[in-house]
Amino acid sequence: MLLVWIWQFGARRRDARSFRQHRRLPVRERFPVFGGLVFWLCVIGASAFAVLALSRPTATVSVVRTAGVDLVILQDGSASMRTKDVPGDRWQRSMKFLRTLGESLAWRDDRIAMALFAHIAAPQVRLTKDPNTFFFFLDHLSRESPFRIEDDTTWDTNIELGIAWGLRLIEKDEEIYGRNPNAKAFVLVTDGQAWTGEVANAVRASRGKDIPVFVVGVGTTVGGIIPEPPKKAAAIGSPPPEPPIRSSLDRGSLGTIANAGGGRYLELDREGDREIANRIIDDARRRAGSRGLQEEHEDLYWRCLAAAAVLLGAGVMFLQERVELLLQTAGAAAALAVVWMLTR
């Protein structure tokens, strides 16, 4: 097609010279160099880009990649998390938020880990980039805490041990895979614990490793009764049963932990789950380093189609015959009609 266009251009120039030699006019006649051939040159270029787009071209580009985030979730699994002062109970409300947090991650370079704690701690998920692993555990933990309410160790909230286990998860990951440029952050989901020297030591250790602690409070300040475990029939002469224990959200101590940990305090149902999740991820991502220059393959399909459309539109501007312009308008209308019928 390009050779035919060049031949037509040569013929046009020969005709222009012939006219100048044989026609005699009182004024000098000017002939456009290209005339209507500009339109056909644009059509040839647009066709070339359309054919190129069909081959699905890619380009290798070097980009500066920002590191992701490593979120270590420290989930309170103590008996007070069974209090029903929120829809379902505090545990089920926490699992709903954690699912939103997982859905808000990009999962490209981001990783997530999870550990449960009461009087003791138990890691559930080590740092992973696989969302299926994380959501699998959430599906199996959605109803109730794995810590049995009949066990005495469940009736204690040991945030210090939870943070210590979070640090161990990160240290073990670095021991196995080496140091990772991802920004680290703890997400502590709990209903509260009194501020003590032990908690202060754990928070200080976290700050020493530049790992902020974001605290997410669950529950209400009004609180509710913690469900009692099933009891055996009382023997004659046994002491009367203890009164039920009431639990409420300890907003003050949680705010203190967040401030000391270099993060922030957030509370479920005071803000939307998605807003809380995005705020945690954004704050953590600002601390992320760089992975340096990395090569990526970029798809050029849509760019080629855009170039074809621009060339075709530019070519229409050089049409000189009204009939040609009408034909182009009719063709564009037909193409739009086909696209509309296929996409409605």
Image (cartoon, rainbow, N blue to C red):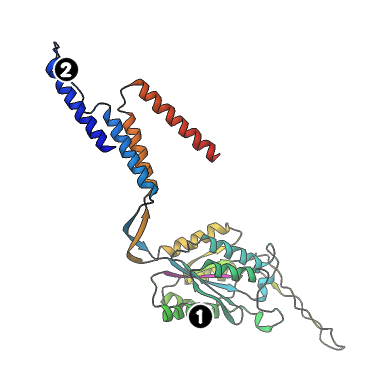
Q: Is residue 230 left or right of residue 130?
A: right
Residue where numbered disc 2 is placed: 29
Q: From what the image shows, is residue 262 above or below residue 320?
A: below
The three-letter amino acid code for the residue at tag 2 is Glu
Closer to the eye: label 1 or 2: 2
Give coordinates of residue 67: x percent, y percent. 39, 65
The three-letter amino acid code for the residue at tag 1 is Ala
**How far is disc 1 from disc 2 in space, using C-alphas?**
91 Å
Rendered image: mark on residue 132: none
Q: Residue at x 38, y 47 (%)?
A: 53
Identify the secondary structure beneath mark 1: helix
Quarter of the figure with residue 33: top left
The image quadrant where one finds the C terminus is: top right
Give coordinates of residue 101: x percent, y percent. 54, 63
Please rate how many residues cluster around mark 1, counting C-alpha atoms within 10 Å: few if below 14, some from 14 to 19, many from 20: some
State yes or no: residue 185 in magenta.
yes
Quarter of the figure with residue 326: top left
Residue where numbered disc 1 is placed: 164
The image quadrant where one finds the N terminus is: top left
User: Which secondary structure is most common in the magenta stretch?
Assistant: strand
State yes or no: residue 337 in magenta.
no
Nearer to us in this view, 183 or 125: 125
Q: Residue furthest right?
A: 236
Q: Which residues are magenta?
A: 182-189
- Residue 228 in sight from this viewpoint: yes
